[in-house]
Image: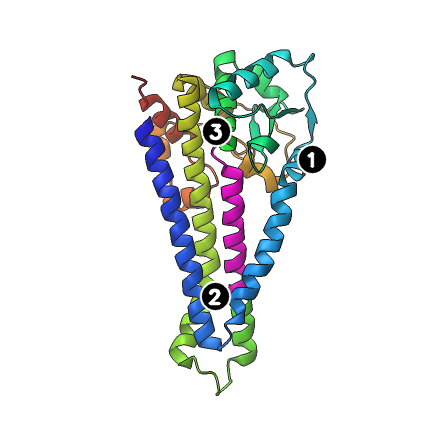
């Protein structure tokens, strides 16, 4: 289990480093090609302003988008007790608790840090999961809070925004200045800049999705460490993936927050998940549930 957690953390930071290298490379090539070093500085400034706005208000936006309502303690006493116990075990403050009126079992956590966190679960999750399975789901979501995943993904969004802005401006400059004989970048740099402007946003998105998948694996491993019972989360993920309820969650902008994508039912076995097209996996916000379940069941508490 500790080995799995360490591996996930190292790979996440490796991906972040790759992201920064990509941005530096873009800035250098475009500055040489178009003799405009201001491109990188302006793109970073705009992306940071957008990200800060999202950073401070993303929790409220997500809860409103999901139709979440605050859960009264008297009405949801068992849920409150489970969350309180997991919060104590995880060493984080108890988050605000919300309930979403939806038959599909699912949950998500949001908030920029443990002191400003919120946990939302669907009514379907409360009705269909056993207590140990509910504890597994809650521990997974509390792990996102404790691991500062919302903060990390906000940084990733900033980087994706920087790449997108730089690439968009480079394409526009190549259109308006492509015939400029005074361009000091030369033909090679212009060609390289055009290729990067087209391919960089795709590469940035792939890195963003890869970081998201690694954080899911990390939250699974950390959640199992908190409860000391990986089977609880594994069983919950199987039930969630095989549930055939028609969800009312139609806001695709927040699907990546949930423990399982509401728009995708994954009933494959671990063997089938391994054979899934690498392209389908690369463009997914969540790892295949079959693979997540397999990893959880391989974890041994000694």
Residue 263, horizontal then vertical, whole percent: 56, 35
Nearer to the camera, 113 or 186: 113
Q: Between disc 1 and disc 3, whose residue precedes?
A: 1
The quadrant holding residue 221 is: top left
Q: Looking at the figure, which quarter contains the C terminus?
A: top left
Q: Between disc 2 and disc 3, whose residue precedes?
A: 3
Q: Was residue 147 drawn as part of the magenta stretch in this picture?
A: yes
Q: CA distance from mark 1 to mark 2?
A: 35 Å
Q: Is residue 275 visible?
A: no
Residue at the disc numbered 1: 64
SS at mark 1? Answer: helix
The magenta stretch spans which residues? 146-166
Q: Which mark is residue 7?
A: none
Residue at the disc numbered 2: 197
Residue at the disc numbered 3: 143
Q: Main secondary structure of the magenta part?
A: helix
Residue visible at 39% across and 43% down in the picture: 12
């Amino acid at each position: 289990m500790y080995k799995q957690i360490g591996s996930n953390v190292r790979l996440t930071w490796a991906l972040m480093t790759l992201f920064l290298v990509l941005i530096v490379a873009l800035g250098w090539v475009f500055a040489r090609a178009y003799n405009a070093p201001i491109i990188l500085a302006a793109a970073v400034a705009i992306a940071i302003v957008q990200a800060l706005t999202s950073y401070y208000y993303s929790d409220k936006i997500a809860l409103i988008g999901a139709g979440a309502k605050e859960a009264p303690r008297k009405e949801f006493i068992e849920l409150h007790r489970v969350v309180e116990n997991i919060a104590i075990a995880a060493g984080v403050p108890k988050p605000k608790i919300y309930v979403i009126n939806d038959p599909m079992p699912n949950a998500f956590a949001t908030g920029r840090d443990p002191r400003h966190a919120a946990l939302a679960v669907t009514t379907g999750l409360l009705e269909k999961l056993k207590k140990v399975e509910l504890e597994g789901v809650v521990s997974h979501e509390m792990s996102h809070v404790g691991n500062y995943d919302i903060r990390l993904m906000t940084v990733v969004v900033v980087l994706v925004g920087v790449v997108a802005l730089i690439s968009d401006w480079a394409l526009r400059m190549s259109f308006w200045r492509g015939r400029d004989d005074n361009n000091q970048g030369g033909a090679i740099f212009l060609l390289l800049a055009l290729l990067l402007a087209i391919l960089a946003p795709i590469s940035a998105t792939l890195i963003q999705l890869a970081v998201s998948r690694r954080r899911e694996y990390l939250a699974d491993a950390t959640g199992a460490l908190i409860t000391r019972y990986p089977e609880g989360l594994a069983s919950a993920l199987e039930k969630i993936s095989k549930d055939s309820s028609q969800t009312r969650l139609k806001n695709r902008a927040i699907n990546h927050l949930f423990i399982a994508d509401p728009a995708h039912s994954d009933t494959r076995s671990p063997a089938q998940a391994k054979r899934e097209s690498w392209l389908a996996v690369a463009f997914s916000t969540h790892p295949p549930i079959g693979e997540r379940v397999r990893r959880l069941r391989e974890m041994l508490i000694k």
